[in-house]
Structures are given as structure tokens and as C-alpha cells.
Image (cartoon, rainbow, N blue to C red):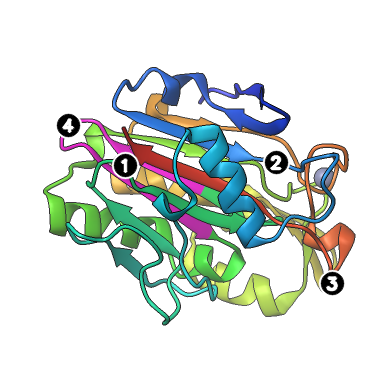
Amino acid sequence: MKQNYVINDTNGAKWLSIPELDKIDFIRHSFIIKQRDSGIETNGALKEIAAKILNLEKGQVATINQTHSDAVFVHNAESRASGADEGFDAHITNNIGIALGVVTADCVPVIIVDKAKRVVAAVHAGWRGTAKRIVQKTIKDMADYFGSKPENMVAGIGPAIGQCCYEVDDKVIGPMKKEFGYLERFSIKKNENKWHIDLQLINREQLIETGLKLDNINLISLCTSCYPDMFYSYRRDGTGAGRMMAVVMIK
Ligand SMILES: [Zn+2]
């Protein structure tokens, strides 16, 4: 596993990138972080920032109506923007020039790239999506729709709330334990009804289970709650928290 990232600034827009994803010459990606001068980011503002960073029109940045589901939207050949009204928490495309965004503020953003078939995906995985194995469902759809194989995939796991700050009760730990035999490796019991879990590593484990090579999984190991200068955090900032966006596109 590699833990590396670069902090970028495009005309004042701040974002992180993963060097191993930058090496893939047919894509561009960005993890848009807190924009220090512009206050609380909304979805519309994030699309504008993404367009600026990727040098696109705002209409080329596609988002989905995220509802903590395990539903995956597959863009068709004509698809250029937001997919549909129903809830989706991941989307996939092999279209050129459409940027797939997912919006987060503690949840885990995951970018997946199939280097062989030239397919990209952006996934939003909070605890519910993680428990529903949304990254694995996304990979299955990449295989079903585009013939993608996990061994050809490279993944980037973006900043999310860390185990240091993500305290949960049995409402969360119950379904997680049921789903993941390996949960103990990624959770610490604090007292009778409090655990700290590592959502990034549970998602990484799902990627490994599905057949991605460990060397092809890149993790930005920064806690959104621990670094208020860099990130928004729902846990830290409450319901008024700003949002960040992970975005990937085929050039
Ligand atoms: Zn933390």
C-alpha cells in the first residue's frame, strides 16, 4: 500500500492528487478539498471548481443524487451530466470528456480506473455504503458492462474520517460485524457500546477481496476531522458542514 498525495493549487482552487493515478495517461482526477477563501462549498460550487481544475465546462461534470445506497449508475454513450433522480452512490463511464464526481464530508471517496478497457468509476462510501459493499458492486458492474477485470484496475481512496475520530455505536457495528468477518482488524472497542472503525481500510479490504492488487491501491491516509484547515468534516462541523468532491474523467 502506498500513502502518497500531492497538494495542488489551480488558480486558487485547492485539491489533492495521487501520483500513481497521475501516471495513467488517459485520465485526470482530483480530490477537491476545503477552499480556504470561499466558505462552505455546495454541489454547484464544487462543479465549478472541478471544471476549473480539469479545464472543462461545468456541464461536463456529472454528479449523482447520493443517498447512502448501493446503487450504481452506468452512463450510456450520450450521457453528459447528472444521471437520474433516483439515488445512486457510484457511477461508471467509458465516455471521453465527462467527469464523474462524488461529494463527501467524512465518507470515503473511491476512484477506480480500469487501465485495460479504459473505464473509470467514482464511488461514495459512508458506513452504509461500505456495509452494503458498494465498491464491490461497482467493480461487478464495470465487469458486466465493460468487461473490466480487477487485476487491471488501479484505485485511489481519498481523505475520509479516520479511525481516530470515527466513533460508532452498535447500530453501525452490528451490521458491519455481520457483513465482514475481518472487522476486528479494523475496529477498536472503546467501551460497552462504542467502537472506532476504519472505513478506508474496510473499503481497501473489499477491493483486495475482489481481486485488485495491493500495489494498485493508493490511500490518502488523512483524517477529515483532524485537519480542519484542509477538510470539511460532518462529524466535526455538524449539519452545516461544507462538502468536498472526488472527480475522475477520461481525457
Ligand atoms: Zn481524526
- Majority secondary structure in the magenta region: strand
Q: Give neighbour class at mark 2: few <14, some 14-19, many 20+ (Cα, 10 Å).
A: many
Whole-angstrom CA distance, mark 3 to mark 4, is 48 Å
Kindly identify the residue that appears in the image at 84 percent across and 72 percent down. 192
Q: Is residue 1 left or right of residue 244?
A: left
In this view, the residue in front, 200 or 124, is: 124
Provide the secondary structure element on which disc 3 rests: loop
| Residue carrying label 3 | 192
- Mark 2 vs 4, N-terminal side: 2
The image quadrant in which ligand 1 is located: top right
Whole-angstrom CA distance, mark 2 to mark 3, is 35 Å
Residue 60 at what x, y percent from top left? 40, 50
Whole-angstrom CA distance, mark 1 to mark 3, is 50 Å
Residue 93 at what x, y percent from top left? 27, 51
- Mark 3 vs 4, N-terminal side: 4
Q: Find out whether the residues at labels 2 and 3 contact each other: C-beta distance under 8 Å.
A: no
Q: Give neighbour class at mark 3: few <14, some 14-19, many 20+ (Cα, 10 Å).
A: few
Q: Nearer the viewer, mark 3 or mark 4?
A: 4
Whole-angstrom CA distance, mark 1 to mark 4, is 18 Å
Q: Is residue 218 left or right of residue 31?
A: left
Q: Amino acid at mark 1?
A: Gly
Whole-angstrom CA distance, mark 1 to mark 2, is 22 Å
Q: Which mark is residue 175?
A: none
Q: Amino acid at mark 4?
A: Ala
| Residue carrying label 4 | 116
Snapshot quadrant of residue 141 = bottom left
Provide the secondary structure element on which disc 2 rests: loop
| Residue carrying label 2 | 33
Q: Which residues are magenta?
A: 110-124
| Residue carrying label 1 | 97
Residue 46 at what x, y percent from top left? 62, 51
Q: Relative to residue 201, is residue 215 depicted above or below?
A: above
